[in-house]
Amino acid sequence: MPRLPHLPTLVLAACLTAPLFAAPLRAQEPIDMSQTVIESQIKSFLRGDIEGAYSHAAPAIKEIYPTVEQFGKMVRGGYGPVYRPGNYAFGRSRETPGGGVIQEVLIAGPDGEDYTAIYLMERQADGTMKIRGVSLIKQALPQT
């Protein structure tokens, strides 16, 4: 069962930081597309559908991990919070030159810790968005 105690923290963080990265109205389409792709990949991971998750990877990622099995091993080994998130919420986002997007995803990890996953999204020649990379940052809670 997903851990719910961190959800209020994630939602509050998303609400407080969203204005900092507020994008112009024209950028909403790529951001919406990116969020749809990211959510689809996370749901694929949660279903155990590594092939479905792999379909959202950009060509550069597929060059590094040319098989679904290699990709799955990499994600399971280094991206546990993305592979098996408790709760997650979209944070700040912004469009990059060339039509890409940088999207924060706030995640309650399976280890009980909070993380920020920073997704680098890349627009493809056919207009779709693919995941070019993810950086995972473990959040330190402020001292009280």
Image (cartoon, grey):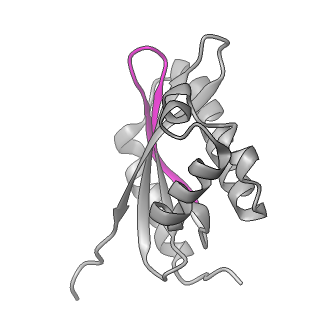
Taking depth in this image into account, of 57 and 34 the one nearest to the observer is: 57
* Magenta stretch bounds: 89-103
Q: Residue at x 38, y 16 (%)?
A: 97
Q: Is residue 65 above or below residue 107?
A: above
Is there any visible trace of residue 30 in the rendered image? yes
Residue 35, position as x, y percentages in the image: 61, 41
Name the quadrant containing residue 52.
Answer: top right
Q: Is residue 110 above or below residue 56?
A: below
Relative to 103, is 36 on the left or the right? right
- In this figure, what is the number of numbered marks? 0
Taking depth in this image into account, of 29 and 115 the one nearest to the observer is: 115
Is there any visible trace of residue 28 in the rendered image? no
Q: Residue at x 59, y 35 (%)?
A: 34
Q: Residue at x 59, y 17 (%)?
A: 124
Residue 12, position as x, y percentages in the image: 47, 65
Is 36 covered by the magenta stretch? no
Residue 36, position as x, y percentages in the image: 68, 40
Q: Is residue 144 above or below residue 10?
A: below
Q: Quadrant of the C terminus?
A: bottom left
